[in-house]
Each structure stands twice: as C-alpha cells, then as structure tokens.
Amino acid sequence: MASPPKRIPLLGGLSTARFLRDHWQKKPLLVRGAFPAFRDPLDPDELAGLSCEDGVESRIVREKGGAHPWEVTWGPQLEAGFAKLPKRGWTLLVQEVNRWVPEAALLLEPFAFLPNVRVDDVMTSFAAPGGSVGPHLDSYDVFLIQGRGKRRWMYHTRPTKDRRIEPDLELRILQTFEPEADEVLGPGDMLYLPPGFAHHGVAVTSCLTHSVGFRSPSAGEVWSSLAVAAARTAEGARLLADPPLAPASNPGAIPVALLERVRAMVRSLDTSDEAIDRWFASFATRLKPGHELEPRRKGAPEPKALPLLRKLERGATLARSEEARWAFLPHTNDALLLYVGGTEIVVPAEACALARALAAKRRHEGHELADLVKTPAARELLVHLVAMGALYTLP
Ligand code: SIN
Ligand code: CO
C-alpha cells in the first residue's frame, strides 16, 4: 500500500502535493508556527553591518521624514546613517543574504520540494515599529518568514485587479489597497504569497522578516538568451553572404534568394528536445550578474582527492557555494548532465549518485558521503567541483 502523503508543519499540515495543487501560484497560505522555535540566522546589527559592505545590495526605505515620501537609500549604507534614523517608520532590506550568511542559505532547504532552477534568494528586512515598504505587488512567489518581533500583514486573498501605482515615486506603491486579510505574524509564522497578490507588511514592533523568493525568467529573457546562444554557435559562419543576385529593377525590393537564405538560417536552429533542454538547463542555472564561483586562490595547491576525503572522514561538512544554482538532466547510458552555474558537466554513471545528492541539498556531513565517493569517477567529480569553487568544506 502506498504510504500516505507526508504532512509537514512548514505548510500548516498540508502535504507538499496539496500545497502545490491548491496554493502554489494560486492563493496565499498563512502558516502559524511553520518554523517552531525559529532562530534568526543573523541579528539586526549583523544585517546593518552587512548592508555597509561593498557588493551587498540593500535599501533603506522611509515612508515619511526623508527628502520625499517613500525615500529609498541604496547601499552600501553608511554606518553613520543608521544613527540618524528615527525610532519609527523605516525599513532596511538586504538582498541575497543566503550568499553572505551560510545559516540564511539553510532557510532555503525546507523548500527543496520546489526545483532549484526556480530559487531566487533570501532577502532579510529589519523594520523599526511602523516601518513598511507600502502596499505593493511582486512578480515572484515568496514565503515571508517572520523572525524576531511582530509584523502585521495585510494582503489580498484573490489576484489583485487594480494595479495602478502612485506616480513619481522610487517605489511601486499601489494607489488603492483594500486588504482582504489582516494578520499579525510572530516568530516562526510564515505567509506564502503568489505573484500578483497585493500585500502590505507593517512592523508592529521592531522586527526581522526573511523573504524566501522564487522567480521564473520572463519570456523576453528566455528568448533573448536563446538568441545569444544561437549567435554564439553561428559565430564565424557567413550565412548571410549574398546568394547569386539578379540585377535589381528596384533597389527597394529584397531579393527572393536572399530571403530564402535568411529563412534557412532561422530554420537551422536546432530545436530538438535535447538541444532545447540542454540550453535551458544551462540558462536556468546561469550565474546571476555579479555572482562568481571562486576558484582556488592563485598559487593555492590544487585540491586532491585523498586529503579531501580524509577531511570528510574526520567529520568536515561539504557545502555548496550559494553563487550557483544546481540542476541535472538525464543523459545517455545512465550518465547525467550536471549544470552548476551554467556550466555543463557530463557525469558518468558511477558518479551519478553523488551528483544527484549534491544537487538535492546544500550541505552534507562527511559520513553521509562515504558511500557516494567510493568510485574513482565520483572522486574525480568531487575534486572538480571543489576546484571550480562550487563546493567547499566547513570544518
Ligand atoms: C519587507 O520585508 O519589508 C517586505 C517584503 C515584501 O513585501 O515582499
Ligand atoms: Co512584497
């Protein structure tokens, strides 16, 4: 007999299948106690410190009291700037906290029932009492996990129809917003919102909120990336060299022979399932702008299988870099195609179990890997991934 679907506290007792059927991209879900005994992966001071660092994307939003309503100050923030902020009515938002704080990356793990290629980031906000970013719409799915403090969430329970925004503001604030639900969330509570559902979160007390965001590329991004990939394969080929031409009776006419060449060129695009799937896997795992896998430092020794395995045997943890997304496709003869940050790696059958395990979760205790790194092919893959900066060991 098939075992009954697992009901998980994260989803308020719903099974993942039920959540995906009834809520994902369809309607909000409020879960009280989604994360029992929740601990914030970083505290407000650490968040403020992070926002002052170069390369970290952040915003401070002030509804009132700034140079104009809903003033946005982009990072890197200045330490002195924090001292000047009032007691109420502002929010600091820091993007991609999962990249900078390993514990924040672990907030993504409970959502492993969703594909890696849909993951965007974890954004953490700190709000002083009364702080908010105004009523707005997002174009991505988001799980809003309440950390310390309390936040009141007002939101639509049906897709928002009136999408008009206030003119001339730095933020896209809705002109009208009549909430259909109004709830105060405390530590460990969570609100899931699909794209296109208006929401407005106001800090009741000073509080932290962690937004686990999922996005999918727009059709425009998909087409332009496909075109760039096609241009790369076509580089050097003079497909548009003139065909034999007849004298033009009117230079405005486009010669039929030339049109035939162009049609043939466009139709030469490989649209087999395999070509499309491989391009998409690479596209969907590509490094985001500013992301970079950090191969070993210049002059540092090449990682070697034996010392690495010994480290893992001694209890080190293997962790995935947050710079890249991971995905895989089946390949011929039980092999896999593994995609890490847009790079395709052909994984032979003997290393597939390791590749699947690494794609499935962010961290592995050394002992969990023992059986997976027994074959030379698996060891080679492990060393390769460490050398390219996609994996690293934690003591
Ligand atoms: C916030 O954390 O203040 C805003 C999150 C959101 O509304 O998406
Ligand atoms: Co939002």
Image: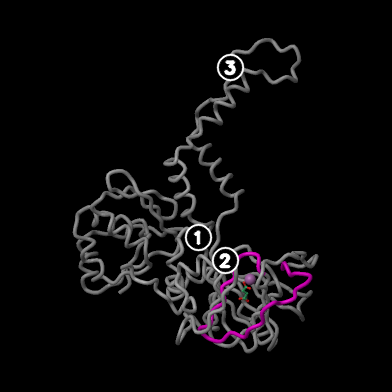
Q: Amino acid at mark 1?
A: Arg
Which residue lies at the image location 24% right of the left edge and 74% below the top edge?
Answer: 315
Q: For the residue with label 1, is its CB less than 8 Å from the closest atom of ligand 1?
A: no
Which residue lies at the image location 50% right of the left edge and 60% below the top edge?
Answer: 118
Q: Amino acid at mark 2?
A: Asp
3D distance between C-alphas at marks 3 and 1: 45 Å
Q: Are marks 1 and 2 in contact (CB under 8 Å)?
A: yes
The 10 Å Cα crowd at callout 2, few under 14, some 14 to 19, many 20 or more, is many
Chief secondary structure of the magenta portion = loop
Rendered image quadrant of residue 215: bottom right
Q: Nearer the viewer, residue 119 or 85?
A: 119
Q: Which color scheme does this rendered protein use?
A: one colour
Rendered image quadrant of residue 341: bottom left
3D distance between C-alphas at marks 1 and 2: 9 Å
- Nearer the N terminus, badge 1 or badge 2? 1
Q: Is residue 118 above or below residue 251?
A: below
Ligand 1 positioned in quadrant? bottom right
Q: Nearer the viewer, residue 89 or 332?
A: 332
Which residue lies at the image location 68% right of the left edge and 70% below the top edge?
Answer: 198
Outermost top residue: 247
Q: Is residue 381 above or below residue 48?
A: above
Q: Which residues are magenta?
A: 171-197
Q: Which residue is mark 2?
A: 141
Quadrant housing the C terminus: bottom left
Residue 181 lies within the magenta run: yes
Numbered-mark total: 3
Q: Is residue 199 left or right of residue 146?
A: right
Q: Which residue is mark 1?
A: 118
Q: Which mark is residue 243?
A: 3
- x then y, percent, for residue 271: 48, 37
Q: Is residue 74 left or right of residue 332?
A: right
Quadrant housing the N terminus: bottom left
